């Protein structure tokens, strides 16, 4: 199975088995996975789960694919596509156990806030569609306005998502490349975790 995953059809919902062969295994998505450090770290640590990275920049997709191949991880793949479309329309319904959005582009300019994924109904409705009952959305960002937008968006969807604690020792969760850079620069990281309310 190649590390690079290319959807057989970009205009319909994928089936779970098209992404990884065994549809009974938990599937986790790393949106905007960058160079794939977190993705491959998680895949190596949790061989019983499957991990799909989504990234739109070709150079980062290639780096991630090389990391997957070098580490011989059959449970990790990378797809070159846009995040909102992937979540809104492409990933299979009720298939994802955890979706990670780590250090997303902050879109700091006034007037660009609508580009933040957490402000887009296409993304939020898609999240409801693709998560399994009890599935989770995990967000980390150094950008306070982005974080506040996320809190506000999810506050309007309390019938769909409940916020759950995320203590330091909750589970294995390697830091990402950007997170390490931001921490080195003295910035703080905000994080939150929401669970899809059982339907
Ligand atoms: C700030 S970097 C963070 C990378 C990685 N998650 C980390 O924490 O090290 C954001 C990444 O998301 C990707 N990205 C931004 N918007 C995207 C979109 N709409 N669809 C897919 N990838 C996107 C960028 O190309 C970039 O690699």
Image (tube, rainbow, N blue to C red):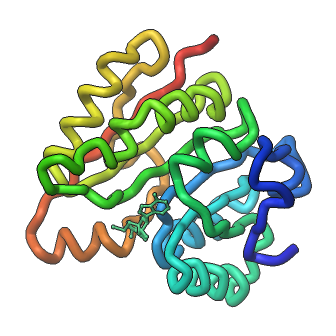
Q: Residue at x 23, y 42 (%)?
A: 147
Q: Position of residue 124 (x, y in %)?
A: 47, 32
Q: Residue at x 65, y 88 (%)?
A: 66
Q: Residue at x 32, y 39 (%)?
A: 192
User: Which residue extends farthest left?
Assistant: 186
Quarter of the rendering occupied by the N terminus: bottom right
Task: Using residue 151 as the reference point, say whether residue 173 is left or right of it.
Answer: right
Task: Using residue 9 as the reference point, say whether residue 83 is left or right of it.
Answer: left
Foreground: 144 or 70?
144
Foreground: 31 or 108?
108
Task: Using residue 50 as the reference point, say whether residue 82 is left or right of it.
Answer: left
Q: Position of residue 49 (x, y in %)?
A: 72, 53
Q: Position of residue 138 (x, y in %)?
A: 43, 43
Q: Position of residue 80 (x, y in %)?
A: 62, 69
The relative height of residue 178 versus residue 94 in the rendered view (above or below) is below
What is the number of callouts on the image? Answer: 0
State which quadrant residue 131 falls in.
top right
Foreground: 139 or 109?
109
Ligand 1 occupies quarter: bottom left
State which quadrant residue 166 falls in.
top left
Q: Residue at x 50, y 35 (%)?
A: 122
Quarter of the rendering occupied by the C terminus: top right
């Amino acid at each position: 199975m190649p590390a690079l995953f290319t959807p057989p059809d970009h205009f319909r919902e994928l089936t779970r088995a098209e992404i990884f062969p065994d549809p009974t295994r938990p599937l986790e998505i790393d949106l905007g996975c960058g160079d794939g450090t977190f993705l491959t770290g998680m895949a190596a640590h949790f061989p019983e789960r499957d991990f799909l990275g989504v990234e739109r920049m070709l150079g980062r997709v290639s780096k991630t694919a090389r990391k997957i191949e070098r580490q011989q991880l059959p449970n990790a793949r990378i797809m070159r596509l846009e995040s909102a479309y992937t979540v809104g329309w492409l990933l299979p319904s009720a298939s994802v156990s955890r979706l990670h959005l780590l250090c997303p582009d902050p879109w700091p300019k006034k007037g660009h806030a609508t580009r933040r994924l957490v402000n887009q109904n296409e993304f939020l409705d898609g999240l409801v569609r693709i998560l399994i009952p009890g599935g989770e959305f995990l967000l980390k960002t150094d950008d306070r306005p982005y974080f506040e937008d996320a809190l506000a968006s999810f506050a309007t969807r309390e019938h769909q998502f409940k916020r759950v604690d995320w203590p330091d020792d909750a589970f294995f969760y390697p830091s990402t490349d950007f997170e390490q850079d931001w921490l080195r620069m003295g910035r703080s990281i905000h994080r939150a975790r929401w669970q899809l309310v059982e339907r």
